[in-house]
Image (spheres, rainbow, N blue to C red):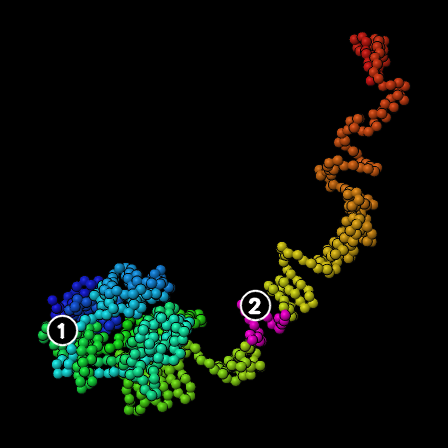
């Protein structure tokens, strides 16, 4: 059942009511482009006060939801009116960021459903897709950088699909619309019409390049169809030895459009995302088919007879129709409705249709592409470095915008030619005898211009060409690029410039600063560094012009130092090490300790000298005996106290006389351990006693024998006998 009124819903599509006061309801639809709805309501009405909510929804008679995005208020005397602009819920896809985890840098043989499933997942399943036709597999590159809507537009572009949304279910078909036999005829339903056929973009010979400038040259001619090969074989040298020697295809209509001036009308496509020769050939064929006939555009304001007679077909987006108006040159022309403006709620306004034979997608009317175009310039330069992938996208977008723009040509009274955008009249290009200018604000200001005085522009995108010289600045405050010399700065003459680089890579600069490392007045020649000094760490390490090297608190690890002399000071107390050995000097510069290396055959000696330089002792090892010998006039080994004794461990041998000038204690020796002592004692015994010191006994009468100091004292006291034994 057809709805008589628009219905109003809140942000969650909960019904609020119907818009009984809505007027001038207009719906615009374009193939693969804009789906919008607009209407007016009085600002004093309940519709405006209670039922119009930003980001709320309205639903039309087809059951489609549109999001309320904009409210424009207008005062006309005492009359207050609001114009409400809405877009189909399809375009809410622009609010979803395509996840980085699903980004595809490159994939081969991808089915369309794989990408639509990923897009649906990015929306949390809120949007689903219905693939209503069979699409070939496609090699995908750099997919998923932006929003879900950008991803959907990429799918449409890659697979050549067309969209027909049913709210949150998006149908993808090879071609939408039907052929219901609808005709637009003069004196039947045509109220007004315009007919434009344009051969400005006519192409009968299409060249093609893919990434890195590669073409079909050198590829086998078997890649071509029979008709394509036959057309190329008519050109001498186009196919040699079964291989292509040219990178173009010829249209079958080339002979029809050929003149004595132009045998062909040339065009070229450059597809930087293509790396396969078969993909390049298919893109080349498609581009040639779209441009080998004049672009046809018919705009018809037709009576909506279907509103009065239900038997009459209603126009639908993408439908095939026939146009008949012989006076305008339309004699049964058949084409598709690519744009449809409808007034579904009123009988006094009729549909306006745009009919074309070639689908010219207006890129500037697609929300996602508008967002992409807006961001692409700011992303073109990142940290001062040109991003080549963004640059390629920028160039591709510029070509698409120019080729697909809806432009009308105007001849102003003041002269010249004005090209003006139909959808945005502020965008203008003017050509006059004074030059060419581009404006985006209705010619109040000029964004870019080419005149006899030069070129003016905010930006230059791409290669700047091949010039003999290029300069920035004037006088000696100048930067020069010279075709024969090189690059220089600071002087108008290359050889006098303080900074210059020639084509051999030789650099001359007055001063070079790199990350706080400064090199002044120094030369780097054949591996040699010539300069006043080398300083590291504010004098922590220095090498001066005399060859002196100074290091503070430095340590050398894991290396070898080889030199003639190593010393701790130039004079006075010091230690020196050289090829003659090691020496220790006192404050008067006299050698006090020396390890000499002058004699390899006899000994290595540690020599101690007195203040006169004479040797007072040495520790020497002679190779003959293998014994270390200490020579000295006097050797004193002392200890500070008895608590720190001097111990000779092991088995020390004293070969010479030993003199003890003080008490010797702790000497624990038996008679037998002292060599010859026992025999000397025996000799002394014999000499004293006159006999051998063998044992004997004798008996004494104690009673008559006095003992002790007292003569009267008897021993033992009780009398008896006392027996002694002599040893």
The question of residue 70 being in magenta is answered with no
The question of residue 523 being in magenta is answered with yes
> Can you give x and y, in whole percent of width and height, for residue 524 in the image?
62, 71
Q: Secondary structure at mark 2?
A: strand
User: Is the residue 489 above or below the residue 175 in the image?
Assistant: below
Left or right: 471 in relation to 101: right
Who is closer to the viewer here, 208 or 420? 208
Question: Outermost residue toward the bottom?
Answer: 414
| Number of callouts | 2
> Can you give x and y, in whole percent of width and height, for residue 370 in the image?
31, 72
Residue at the image point whose x is 15% and y is 75% from the top = 182
Left or right: 289 in relation to 567: left
Q: Nearer the viewer, mark 2 or mark 1?
A: 1
Residue on which the image places disc 2: 517
Q: Which residues are magenta?
A: 504-526
User: Is the residue 515 above or below the residue 635 in the image?
Assistant: below
User: Is the residue 486 above or below the residue 57 in the image?
Assistant: below
Question: Outermost residue toward the front?
Answer: 241
Report crowding for label 1: few under 14, some 14 to 19, many 20 or more residues within 10 A (C-alpha): some
Who is closer to the viewer here, 673 or 640? 673
Residue at the image point whose x is 18% and y is 72% from the top = 179
Left or right: 580 in relation to 37: right
Report crowding for label 2: few under 14, some 14 to 19, many 20 or more residues within 10 A (C-alpha): few
The answer to whether residue 200 of the structure is visible from this angle is no
Residue on which the image places disc 1: 313
Residue at the image point whose x is 27% and y is 83% from the top = 198
Who is closer to the viewer here, 183 or 608? 183
């Amino acid at each position: 059942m057809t709805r008589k009124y628009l219905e109003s819903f809140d942000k969650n599509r909960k019904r609020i009511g119907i818009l009984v006061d809505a007027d001038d309801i207009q719906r615009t639809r374009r193939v693969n482009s804009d789906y919008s709805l607009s209407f007016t309501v009085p600002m004093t009405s309940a519709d405006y006060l209670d039922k119009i909510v930003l980001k709320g929804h309205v639903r039309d008679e087809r059951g489609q939801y549109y999001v309320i995005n904009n409210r424009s208020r207008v005062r006309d005397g005492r009359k207050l009116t609001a114009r409400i602009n809405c877009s189909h819920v399809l375009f809410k896809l622009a609010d979803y960021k395509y996840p980085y985890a699903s980004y595809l840098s490159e994939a081969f043989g991808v089915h369309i459903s794989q990408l639509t499933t990923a897009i649906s997942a990015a929306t949390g399943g809120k949007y689903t897709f219905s693939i209503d036709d069979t699409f070939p597999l496609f090699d995908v590159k750099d997919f998923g950088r932006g929003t879900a809507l950008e991803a959907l537009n990429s799918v449409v572009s890659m697979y050549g699909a067309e969209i027909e949304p049913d709210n949150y279910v998006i149908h993808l078909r090879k071609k939408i619309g039907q052929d219901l036999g609808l005709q637009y005829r003069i004196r039947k339903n045509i109220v007004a019409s315009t007919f434009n056929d344009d051969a400005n973009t006519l192409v009968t010979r299409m060249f093609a390049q893919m990434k890195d400038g590669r073409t079909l040259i050198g590829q086998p001619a078997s890649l071509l169809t029979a008709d394509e090969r036959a057309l190329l074989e008519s050109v001498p040298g186009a196919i040699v030895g079964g291989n292509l020697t040219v990178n173009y295809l010829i249209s079958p209509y080339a002979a029809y459009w050929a003149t004595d001036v132009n045998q062909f009308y040339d065009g070229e496509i450059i597809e930087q995302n293509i790396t396969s020769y078969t993909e390049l050939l298919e893109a080349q064929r498609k581009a040639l088919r779209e441009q080998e006939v004049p672009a046809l555009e018919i705009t018809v304001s037709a009576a909506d007879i279907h509103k009065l007679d239900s038997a009459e077909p209603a126009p639908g987006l993408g439908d095939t129709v026939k146009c008949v108006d012989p006076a305008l040159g339309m004699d049964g022309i058949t084409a598709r409705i690519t744009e449809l403006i409808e007034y579904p709620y009123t009988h006094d306004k009729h549909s306006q249709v745009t009919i074309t034979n070639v689908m010219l997608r207006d890129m500037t009317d697609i929300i996602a592409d508008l967002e992409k175009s807006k961001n692409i310039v700011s992303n073109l330069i990142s940290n001062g470095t040109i991003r080549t992938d963004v640059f390629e996208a920028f160039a591709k977008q510029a070509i698409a915008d120019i080729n697909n723009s809806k432009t009308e040509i105007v001849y102003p009274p003041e002269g010249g030619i004005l090209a003006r955008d139909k959808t945005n009249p502020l965008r203008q290009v003017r050509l006059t005898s004074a030059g060419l200018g581009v404006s985006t604000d209705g010619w109040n200001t000029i964004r870019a211009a080419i005149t006899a005085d030069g070129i003016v522009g905010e930006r230059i995108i791409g290669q700047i060409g091949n010039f003999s010289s290029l300069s920035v600045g004037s006088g000696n405050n100048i930067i020069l690029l010279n075709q024969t010399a090189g690059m220089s700065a600071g002087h108008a003459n290359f050889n006098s410039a303080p900074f210059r680089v020639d084509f051999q890579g030789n650099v001359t600069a007055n001063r070079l600063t790199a990350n706080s490392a400064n090199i002044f007045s120094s030369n780097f020649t054949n591996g040699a560094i010539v300069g006043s000094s080398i300083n590291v760490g504010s004098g922590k390490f220095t090498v001066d012009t005399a060859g002196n090297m100074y290091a503070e608190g430095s340590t050398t690890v894991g290396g070898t130092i080889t030199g003639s002399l190593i010393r701790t000071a130039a004079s006075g107390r010091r230690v020196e090490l050289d090829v003659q050995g090691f020496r220790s000097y006192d404050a008067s510069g006299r050698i006090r300790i020396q390890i000499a290396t002058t004699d390899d055959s006899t000994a290595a000696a540690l020599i101690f000298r007195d203040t006169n330089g004479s040797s007072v002792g040495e520790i020497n090892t002679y190779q003959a005996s293998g014994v270390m010998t200490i020579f000295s006039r006097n050797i004193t080994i002392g200890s500070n106290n008895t608590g720190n004794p001097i111990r000779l461990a092991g088995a020390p041998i004293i070969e010479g006389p030993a003199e003890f000038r003080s008490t010797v204690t702790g000497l624990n020796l038996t008679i037998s351990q002292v060599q010859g002592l026992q025999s000397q004692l025996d000799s002394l015994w014999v000499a004293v006693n006159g006999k051998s010191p063998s044992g004997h006994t004798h008996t004494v009468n104690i009673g008559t024998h006095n003992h002790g100091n007292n003569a009267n004292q008897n021993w033992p006291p009780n009398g008896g006998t006392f027996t002694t034994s002599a040893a």
